Amino acid sequence: MSYGITGFGAYIPRRRLSRKAIAAAHAWAMPGLAAQGKGERAFASWDEDAITMAVEAARDCQSGAGAAPHSIVLASTTLPFVDRANAVVVAGALGLPRSTICQDHTGSLRTGLSAVASACGAQPAAPSMIIASDLRRAKMGSAQEMAFGAGAAAVTLGNSGVIATFLGAASISVDLVDHYRTTSNGFDYTGEERWVREQGYAKLVPETVHALAAKTGIDLTQVRFVAPPSANPSICALIASCLKIAPDCVIDGLAARVGDLGAAHPLLMLGSALERAQPGDVILSLAFGQGCDALFFRATDAITQPTGRRGVAGAVEDRFADEAYQRYAAFSGLAAYDWGPRAEADAKTPLTEQYRSDHQITPFIGGCCPACGQVQFPQFPLCVKCQAQVTFEPVRLVDAPARIATYTADWLQYSPSPPFYFGLVQFDNGARVLMEFVDVDGRALDVGSAVRMVFRIKERDEMRDFARYFWKAVPLDGKETR
Amino acid sequence: MASGIRDKVAIIGMGCSRFGERWDVGTEALAVEAFTEAMADAGIEKHQIEAAWYGAGVEKVNVQNSAIPLSTALRLSGIPVTKLENMCATGTEALRGAAYAVASGAVDIALAIGVEKLKDTGYGGLPGGRKGTFNDLWMPYGSAPAGFAQLAAGYRAKYRTSREDLKRAIAHVSWKSHQNGVKNPKAHLRKAVGMETILNAPLIAEPLGLFDCCGVSDGAACAIVTTPEIARALGKKDVVTIKALALSISSGAELSTNEWDAARVINTRIAAKTAYAEAGIESPRQQLSMIEVHDCFSITELVTMEDLGLSQDGEAVGDILDGKYDSTGAIPCQIDGGLKCFGHPVGASGLRMVYEIYLQLQGRAGQRQLPSPSLGLTHNLGGVPYNGIAAISVIGLLN
């Protein structure tokens, strides 16, 4: 019985900022940045973090069908909470049962692929999901600001419906500090790039991969695709040369399209390799950070079966240009704007109420009245239509088709992303919910516009350093207006 | 079957403070300003007031909870005072409480007063509203204009009205009220504004621009009510009575089902039906001499013309542009300048509207006086069109 990857998914924030715009913002101080001013990077909205992006990647992964995972791992170096199980929030948003085992993994950019290696080593009978997600901040004018992107990628593992069989894994651990970040300082400190290349990637990657080849008996000439650990094109080229593999076998790191997704990047690249693989192709998956992880997979016949997932290519293409560097800086917490007195409102979350209504809010579950059939969110004790006091049948609204019934662009209300778009969303199943609209830029917004739900931060409580989450609606292509 | 409130309660005195940015006075002084005028108008002694209903909508920027601040401000000597809040219907609710007390026979003379000091928030617009511990977890916090702007999207979709036609009609709503406000010494904004200025003002909540929004101000208004018999015994001529007091609150259906088309306010329609029945009005278009409606935003007034049955559904745009609700039109609307020019001190607005009708019915409206009005209607809309409160009162001369 083979064990391996049964599905994958990805999410990358739609906003893309050209590196030319970043260089232009810093031209007064760092004219040399213009040389790096090629391509674009993804950046997250103010209401996204490692949790919300993980949810979106996992949803994409789930849309490829397959059994619900019995355990999930959220792997990230930027978990919003140091002591509150972030993965439990993700599981709730995914509508997974309370019996789901939820773990947070962190510590290095290897964390996501390390979790995959662990699961593949243990080969549990029940299906599992590994989600890697990272939203790294970078100082203004830094090389990281140019290089970083943001996003998440997920894989499901199991022994049924395997699309890529696990063949083996090898890893080494060594304290080569190519960069580091502490909890008290939100930014990376990096070693010299040339030293990292020569003593790090050029030595540790071959050492690990050759150990893997020896262990599995698979010659590197059999490798069809290499999923690189980083977006950096020179690292991708270096890996090809030091492994003596044809450069075109190394999957495009997507530096020009989205930037480096940190801990999510190895899984993003693995997903990208899986999208290209044909049955029988061998994939080498790599992650780097205080050592190296290397895994071999072989695509099965099931790799060609159509699925509902958007995948890596879809996430890369679902974009819009947002050339306002100041917006990126504000969303990333790099620039302090004066939002005026309306931003002073206390945003305290009553934890009692949050827990009491968590079954409705986090998974976005409405209720269908067994007496009259009306689907409603939120659920109150009495049916909104027939007033019956009933036990509602749960109806998850996350993937339910919906359209805009009313909307406005509110320039008065405080929002970290003005204007504040909101209005009534009419679901095809009869439910109606007042919702915020996000990622509106460049998309049609009118009565009748189709929307899809996304998991986002509802509100940040700056005073208590807390965030609460709910679902928002993203307008789809205007062509779907009716 | 209940006989209703019609002609059971007379208004014998009313007062209204000057509305505006009243940096000069606090909440207590505003209350006293309105109360002093009403007492002089009624011609009674303070000890004759047996009970009071006090409305304030946003207590956090007023004087905090309870009736104590009002009783203290007016030095009411131990009589029952009820503090109430029902969003923008608060002022009308105070009148309802006082009127019902008189009609029940519990008291002979009662006071209704609404006071609000919004300008102590430190910024423009109404304070941003939290929705409660549960709703805060999922409901977007829109501003007040954004809540009402949803009507514009719904109206446009339902009647296939062009953006331009709707924008011009709502601009006319504000243009007309500014014309009226010039003539009112108690109004906050007393300046005529041109159509082009209104149309080109900065957007507040699409499609509402700055001039589509009412002002924010401080103010107080009050009414002293009694029975028609006592009013006559006090020597009152042109006795003004309450013909109807209707209130309708949303069940949440608009927000959670597809029953609502977003082109109307269901609660206004329910309250209007109730009020017309209670007042014995069969044809509001013929019988109402004047109306004071809740023009918090211009789009609200437009939709309200249909909700009150004064324009056919889908025809308010044409009626408004034809001047039907102008000062010289068939049914003058906001002859005092409306919320548009008075601003909207939440607790006071309902009583401020009644004050204008009371003056008009008695022929005391000065430059704004309409020719022999006999019946007027006030309308308040609290909350948002999809989850709100409609309050309607009908006031007229006692036959």
Image (tube, coloured by chain):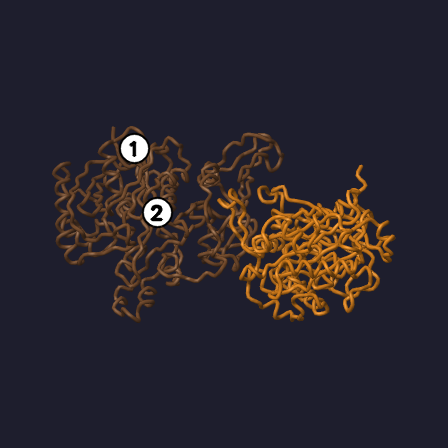
> What tint does the image give chain A?
brown
Identify the amino acid type marked 2: Pro
Residue A411 shows up from this direction: yes
Amino acid type of the residue that numbered disc 1 sits on in the rendered structure: Gly
Q: Secondary structure at mark 2?
A: loop
In the image: residue A10, left or right of residue A222: right
Expressed as whole percent of the image width and height from the top left, the position of residue B202 reads 55, 66
Q: In the image, is residue A20 above or below residue A92?
A: below
Q: Which mark is residue A158?
A: 1
The answer to which image quadrant residue A125 occupies is top left
Q: Residue A258 location, x and y as percent?
A: 32, 55
The answer to the question of whether label 1 and label 2 lie on touching residues, with beta carbons closer than 8 A, is no
Q: Is residue B319 in view?
A: no
Q: Nearer the viewer, residue A369 or B371?
A: B371
Where residue B317 appears, as percent x and y from the top left, is 68, 59
Q: Position of residue A380 (x, y in %)?
A: 56, 37
- In the image, the chain rendered in orange is B
Mark 1 or 2, nearer chain start: 2
Q: In the drawing, does residue A57 fall left or right of residue A429?
A: left
Residue at numbered disc 2: A80
Quadrant for residue A8, please give it: top left
Measured in 3D between alpha carbons, the distance from the residue under mark 1 to the one under mark 2, in whole angstroms, is: 28 Å
